[in-house]
Image (cartoon, rainbow, N blue to C red):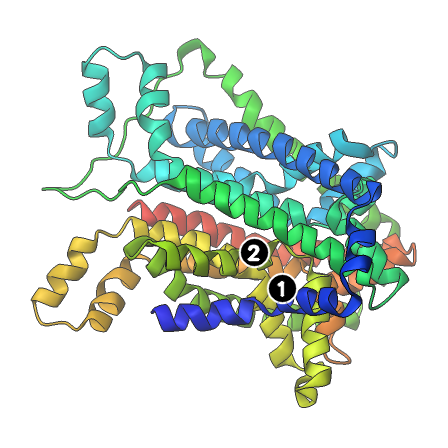
Amino acid sequence: MVVLAALIALFSLVPLGFIGWVTYDVGWETVKTLVFRPRVGELVLNTVYLELIAIPLSIIVAVATAFLTERSDIPFARLWAWLAVTPLAVPAFVHSYAWVSLIPSMHGLASGVFVAVLAYYPFLYLPVAATLRRLDPAVEDAAASLGLAPAAVFFRVVLPQLRIPLCGGSLLIGLHLLSEYGLFAMIRFDTLATAIVDQFQSSYNSPAANMIGGVLVACCLFLLALEVLLRGNERYARVGTGTARPADRQKLGRFRLPALLLPAAMAALTLGVPLITLGRWLWLGGLAIWDGAVTGAVVQTLVLALAGGVLTTIAAVPMAWLSVRAPGRLQRLLEACHYYVGSLPGVVVALALVSITVRFLLPLYQTFAMLLAGYVLMFLPRALVGLRASIAQAPVELERAAMALGRTPGQALRQVTLRLAAPGAAAGVALVALGITNELTATLMLAPNGVETLATRFWSLTSEIDYVAAAPYAVMMVALSLPLTLLLHAQSKRTAGQ
């Protein structure tokens, strides 16, 4: 497992190696000129402010919504739970454009934080809700019997047990905030990622863009170190006689109806505004905007999403197992290699692969193999977070029992741990497929000639200010993503035996 994880980690270092090679090629004096300047400092501050505000707000919204839908007697809890997941079906740049269309004056940090929370808080809601379903309520009952009030039970007993999903989901959101381009470009809020893309658009092989990419990698490594520090090495699997009973839903009393305001408001903000905007585009275009090009883009998007999701999840298995079963310095180093690439914009990953294929592997240039390799690099963190949490919930004693009964370590892993972690693997495939369905910049650069996905067609038409013709592609992106969000929600419930 260490060898397999090391090979994937080595492959993940390709973009970093590309940035390092460019840094060496331009020389230290040029590096100082391009990196240590006021504009880069402003971009770093913008990115830091974005992370410091958006992540805590996402945690508050996700935990509150998950508690209401999983642990309270709020009306229509199952409906609100599904609606809390469905914003993942709407691409981030569609969220941004919908709000800019509604309120053209939206721009800057506050607007960027607002739209980012709406677009990304489901990445925290999913693991938090899944963990709340699996927690053993006997621990909470014991705390209540010792005299703790319900609020104290939540903060002293329940919340500490949410550490892994909170850390993993926050890291995932943090990486997205570092690498997101389309959302903040439409909001007109400059970050490190938007500056990189702007530099590459002005100069295809811009040293300045690569230097800013190096700063972005440093920010990612800081996030990784902080997540490892906060996560700790506590054990979260339950081992004991019998099975944990489902937790009782808390009665909200007179607050039952007011509590509906939070999930209803989030559903209206995350789904209502984008759907109204897309509906207006479709109404203006009529049936004439639905043509054969839409069908071709749908088929190609489906093939790439499924293939990329499966390959990325398989590549994440060794590292996910090692991070739970064999924590240590080597594991943390390899895990950092898996995670850091998720903070890079797709354009940086794509240019690194293009440079290598053109110089050393020309037959692979603009092939499906290289496009899928780019997807694996970009979406490894998505697959790894879900797998790691699922394997953490599979007691290691079951592996040891299987080996005591004659199974080899590999057989015990396949027949016991991976079966128990299957819901997390399915969720990983779905999360990666969601990302590929909405991925833009890397697909534009790595896809073979003639390959056009829904995202690339949508962006191409909106760049030409043809918003009416772009509407079907946006609608189909949402339609393809909805089943994946349903799968994510269903698998998270299956993990809890529901």
Q: In the image, what residue type sits under mark 1?
A: Leu
**Up-down relation of residue 476 to residue 273 (above or below):** below
Residue drawn 40% across the image and 40% down it: 231
> What is the quadrant of the C terminus in the image?
top left
Q: Between tags 2 and 1, which lies in front?
A: 1
Depth order, front residue of 401/296:
401
Residue under label 1, please give it.
16
Q: Which element carries disc 2, helix, strand or loop?
A: helix
Residue drawn 45% across the image and 40% down it: 167
**Up-down relation of residue 145 to residue 222 (above or below):** above
Residue under label 2, please give it.
340
Residue 321 found in image quarter: bottom left
Residue drawn 34% across the image and 52% down it: 390
**Mark 2 and mark 1: Cα distance apart in space:** 9 Å
Q: Are the residues at dot 2 and dot 1 in contact (C-beta closer than 8 Å)?
A: yes
Q: Is residue 340 left or right of residue 276?
A: left
Dot placed on the residue nearer the N-terminal end, 2 or 1: 1
Q: Which element carries disc 1, helix, strand or loop?
A: helix
At which x and y percent is residue 203? 88, 64
Q: Is residue 282 left or right of residue 173?
A: right
Q: In the image, what residue type sits under mark 2?
A: Tyr
At which x and y percent is residue 144? 23, 16
At which x and y percent is residue 306? 54, 69
Residue drawn 39% across the image and 32% down it: 70
Q: Which label is found at residue 243?
A: none
At which x and y percent is residue 301? 65, 68
> What is the tally of numbered marks visible in this picture?
2
